[in-house]
Image: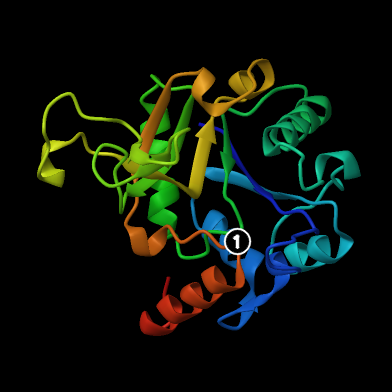
Amino acid sequence: MKAIAFIFARGGSKGLPGKNIRPLAGKPLIAWSIEQALAVKRIERVIVSTDSEEIAQVAREFGAEVPFIRPAELAQDNSPEWLAWRHAINYLQEKNGVLPTAMVSVPATAPLRLPIDIENCLDAYEKGDADIVITVSEANRSPYFNMVKTNEDGTVSLVIPPQTAITRRQDVPVVYDMATVAYVARPEFVLTHHAVFEGRVKAVIVPKDRAVDIDTLLDFQMAECLLSFKGTSC
């Protein structure tokens, strides 16, 4: 299987400015994802898609390719990352004349993953019955049990009201939080569809301590604490 990994890292971040190259346990945040992707033997190339020359320089220093700079219109706060995926795949097709077997997205914001998490996603994809494989982790709350919404009259109710009385969380369907640990997608699917759940989706479960997604300073501090606890061996 020919798999090519992409790390999509734009320069602007309102939640945590400069987060993609902010030092985490001694190296830039993006370096963790680059090194984890490079450790997966089935991945032939690791490419960073960014609009920032500063991020590009750091990415090259840690072994990633940066063969293009992402257009500014694909790196705004409201720019769907799906379009950045398409741009990267179209680049490969134009340069190589063929598409890879799999496009692997390894977000820079999930530095606590292990290479085995990416390997598990590739294993699930290679079974051939999914357009895209995502990662999930066990959810803290359930829309059937302890997640509520506000009604028009100001009261609140469960997001998904049960058909019968439920007194234990174990009695409701198991739900998961989507994680940003890794995605493996069929390139043709990305080019012809507009969102993850338009296709056949499979999921790989990742432990919660490896699924931290960094969006705010608090997330960053949590990652630092976990890495410190683990001896930065993630």
Residue tagged by mark 1? 215
| Residue type at tag 1 | Asp
Q: Residue at x 38, y 19 (%)?
A: 129
Q: Residue 50: x percent and y percent?
A: 79, 51
Q: Residue at x 56, y 63 (%)?
A: 214
Q: Which element carries disc 1, helix, strand or loop?
A: loop
Q: Is residue 199 left or right of residue 88?
A: left
- Which quarter of the figure has residue 25? bottom right
Considering only vertical position in the picture, is 134 above or below 233?
above
Q: Nearer the viewer, residue 51 or 79?
A: 79
- Which quarter of the figure has residue 190? top right
Q: Residue 94: x percent and y percent?
A: 83, 26
Q: Residue at x 77, y 22 (%)?
A: 97
Q: Residue 7: x percent and y percent?
A: 66, 50
Considering only vertical position in the picture, is 7 above or below 133?
below
Q: Nearer the viewer, residue 215 or 109?
A: 215
